[in-house]
Amino acid sequence: MSGSGLPDRVKAWQAEGDFTTFRDYSIYRRRGTGEGQTILFLHGFPTSSFDFAPLIERLPGVPTLTFDFLGYGLSEKPRDHTYTIAWQADLTEALVDELGDGPVFVCAHDLGTSVATELMARDLEGELGFQMAGVLLFNGSILIDRAQPTLAQKLLRGPIGPLAARLSNESFFRRQFSSVFSRAHPPSPEELEDAWALIENNGGSRLGHKLVYYMEERSIYADRWHGAVRDWEGPLSLAWGLEDPVAVPAILEGLVELRPGVEPVTFPDLGHYPQLEDPDRFSEALVAARASRAETA
């Protein structure tokens, strides 16, 4: 479970959810009740489902499901685990299956976009265990050859990855995390404190070299996941903070090339975390995408 040194804001978030078990590992999840299609939120690296707290506050009466992937946030963080997208997708399927209340609308960020495209690929193969009413992808380096990884990601992926993970500290994290936000919307001191506390929780700050493996998989499974973006028959939406220095606008351009019919929502003044930088605007885009997909579902 979680440590006792978490900020009060995170403790309040934790109290709104619970812990379940998947393949003998403890997983944190939070469910919100309401009417209509459930929104399933899939978070990014290296943060957690807490990234979506501001959005959920702005969605009263909307059913939601958020959870921390294995190795992240409040979930268990085994040191000897191989952190694959397929495993996280299996976890996602299991948690959605427990809802048992119809199709869900998927909103996915960063790492979560690869989990979402794996789910789309499974759906194409007729092997997905639930129905997706629609998918909104935002600010993820899905086309890895066009991405601009942070210094931290480069170090963790390289030969000194284990050492870089062991030497990780709050000061370095704060600089790296702040660097992916837009100039006009930097993270607040509270957001920095909360994000680091959730990374450090359960010893997670020493796992970065293992968690970043998803970037390798984006190359290994490029044909499968890019093909899912191109060929998945469900409604697909894109939203993008254009000041993102990692998932740069060239990635969005490439996704539109794969899916010419999509008209993305863009935020010229927002960066890698638009849901934190301007949750009002992002929630409007999310609600509009969900509403349009509900009409066609």
Image (tube, rainbow, N blue to C red):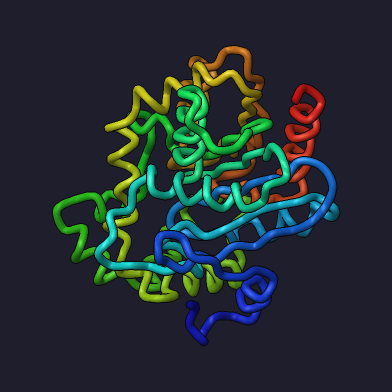
Q: How many numbered dots are placed on residues in this image?
A: 0
Q: For this view, does 66 lie left or right of residue 147?
A: right
Residue 137, percent from left and from top: 57, 35
264 to 279, vertically: above or below? above
Say which residue appears at 76% left-offset and 41% top-offset. 37
Residue 225, picture quadrant: top left
Q: Residue at coordinates 54% horizontally, 66% vertically from top-left? A: 20
Name the residue: 46% across, 44% down. 89
Q: Is residue 4 above or below residue 141?
A: below
Residue 295: image quadrant is: top right
Q: Position of residue 237 (x, y in %)?
A: 64, 28
Q: Is residue 230 positioned above or below 144 on the image?
A: above
Q: Determine whether, in the image, residue 47 is placed left or right of residue 39.
A: left
Figure check: 193 above or below 82: below
Q: Position of residue 251 (x, y in %)?
A: 46, 28
Can I make out residue 270 in this image? Answer: yes
Q: Quadrant of the C terminus?
A: top right
- Direction bottom: furthest residue: 4
- Give the percent coordinates (x, y) of residue 55: 72, 53
Please tell me which residue lies in front, 249 or 15.
15
235 or 137, which is in the foreground?
Answer: 235
Question: Residue drawn at (42%, 66%), measured in percent from left and top?
Answer: 25
